[in-house]
Image (tube, helix red, strand yellow):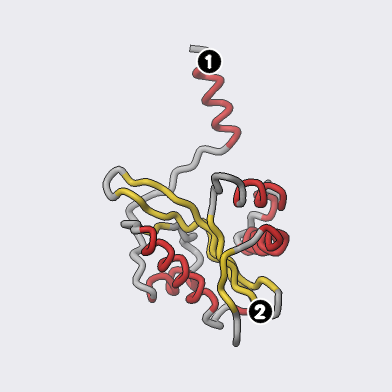
Amino acid sequence: MDFVIRKAKTEDMPQVFSLIKQLADFEKESDAVIITINDLIKDGFGAQPAFFCFVAEINNKIEGIALGFNRYSTWKGKILHLEDLIVNQDLRGSGMGTALLNQVITYGHTLGVKRISWEVLDWNTAAIDFYKQKGAHIMDDWRVVHINEEGIENYMSRLKNK
């Protein structure tokens, strides 16, 4: 199967958004996506892009993406966070996911990062197996911690009321 991996452009964002929605459906979180195509364009292509994105394209149709951003570790220095690696469900097993991951790791290497990190759901055994096969280390003893928008607002209210 012939596909091209390239850096995303603003005009790709409707198709990128569609894959993001597909992933949310797969993860049974369909209602969790609140960003818009305009958010992706504004946040990813301004003077200080909030993320990088590579796309996998077949015949002008985007069938996969790898989207991430820069982070900094107090122990390691510059690192990348891979937010999502998404391949259209019909094309999983085609080598597209490997090609996208290769691109992210190559990109991180050129930036001189000390680590590339991401999360994977514990029930997504296909993804876990894929990442292990690539040499990634799954850290079962760490927990992902989030504070959502509502939690941030509640926190700020408590700070103001002190």
Q: Is residue 92 above or below residue 79?
A: below
* Residue sitting at x 53%, y 23%: 156
* Residue at mark 2: 58
Q: Earlier in the sequence, mark 1 or mark 2?
A: 2
Where does the image place residue 1, in percent across and percent down from the top left?
Answer: 60, 87
Question: How many C-alpha atoms fall within 10 Å of the one at disc 1: few (<14), some, or many (≥20)?
Answer: few
Callouts 1 and 2 close, C-beta under 8 Å: no
Q: Quadrant of residue 16?
A: bottom right
* Residue sitting at x 60%, y 85%: 2
Residue 52 visible somewhere in the drawing: yes
Q: Nearer the viewer, residue 127 or 59?
A: 59
Q: Nearer the viewer, residue 46 or 19?
A: 46
Q: Is residue 43 left or right of residue 142?
A: right
Q: Secondary structure at mark 2?
A: strand
Toward the left, the furthest residue is 75
Where does the image place residue 111, in percent across and percent down from the top left?
Answer: 38, 58
* Residue sitting at x 67%, y 47%: 39
* Residue at mark 1: 160
Toward the top, the furthest residue is 162
* Residue sitting at x 40%, y 57%: 117
Q: Amino acid at mark 2?
A: Ile
